[in-house]
Image (spheres, rainbow, N blue to C red):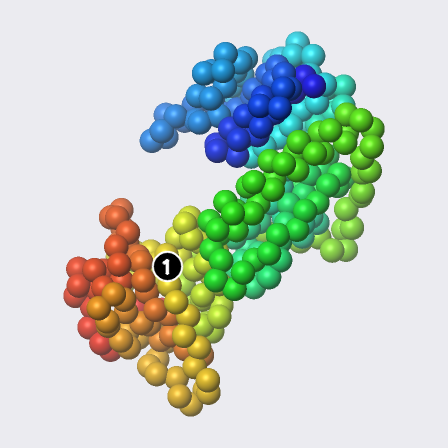
Amino acid sequence: MRVALIGSQDFGKAALEAFLERGDEVVAVFCPPDNPKATKPEILKETALARGLTMLQFPSLKGPEAAQAMRDSKADICVMAYVLQFVPQDLVKIPRFGTIQYHPSLLPKYRGPSAIGWSIALGETKTGLTIFRPSDGLDEGEIILQKEAPIGPDDTLGQVYFNHLFPLGIQALLEAADLVAAGKHKEIVQDESQANYEGWFDQAAARIHWSNHVNQIYNLIRACNPAPGAWTPLNGEKVQIYDVRKHVTATFGSVKGKPGEIVEIGNDSFKVACHGGQIEILKAKVGKGSKVSGAELSASLGLQLGQFFDA
């Protein structure tokens, strides 16, 4: 097939390489313009240029230049893999077989840009991915293909994505493209009664509230690991918490400490009390510093038993 790809970052790069490696012809690659504040180059762009492919970077994909570039590519199908720009219908319908898009949830559940994080934070034990027809509505188009993936009780966002949804998603894009090109696919309208939308998992969402139950806090920390990093203030500084253990107290009356109180400092970690148990901090960092063990953080901050993180 002649494939046009719209995407970015590692997932876009992996999708590009997957289509090339099986012998498809990638006739155009669209990715966002260079970000002058970025600390490293866009990996999809670097890969496309290294392969000698046509690299297209439009400030917006809504203009006539982007549509003309798609027409000039004479693509059979367009594949959207980690897309950060709005893609209008007059562009997605240009290729002979239209366009397919990847989303890391079982649509219509968890529409939006932080689907994996929200599914973990809200205690889901199962997630998945969807390949669908992009529409002008956010993640609202017809479903072509879905695959399920587990969320283990201790899985972090990074583990769910890189161990399951990333590799499964690349294979699903190849499979869906073949089904669409062969006319063997079905397009299923999403059930709006089952739909929910969650916005960006931003700094406000990532803040730890120690008055919450230990299970809620544990899920939040897993959902933010490795990014954006769950955080809690301490004496005006932001402490970001990554690797933790959950300790659930059997009975309410035996809970040690008050919410947010440091109740134990060990050789490798320290524990913070919350409703229903304690969170043991194994890896964290302060501000723009590097991640360190809980014990190293405790020593650097001079933490004391009975000290409280800010509510």
Q: Residue furthest front?
A: 22
- Quadrant of the snapshot with the N terminus: top right
The location of residue 148, given as percent across then percent down, is 66, 51
Q: Nearer the viewer, residue 60 or 218?
A: 218
Residue appearing at x 37%, y 59% in the figure: 243
- According to the picture, the residue beneath numbered tag 1 turns out to be 243
Mark 1 Cα-neighbour bin, 10 Å: few <14, some 14–19, many ≥20: some
Q: Is residue 5 visible?
A: no
Residue appearing at x 58%, y 23% in the figure: 21
Residue appearing at x 46%, y 49% in the figure: 158
Tell me if 306 is positioned left or right of 4 in this view. Answer: left
Tell me if 184 is positioned left or right of 264 in this view. Answer: right
State the image quarter where residue 222 is shown: bottom left
Tell me if 227 is positioned left or right of 272 in this view. Answer: right
The location of residue 83, given as percent across then percent down, is 57, 32
Look at label 1 and name its amino acid. Asp
State the image quarter where residue 166 is shown: top right
Q: Is residue 133 above or below residue 244?
A: above
Q: Is residue 216 visible?
A: yes
Residue appearing at x 49%, y 68% in the figure: 216
State the image quarter where residue 183 is shown: top right
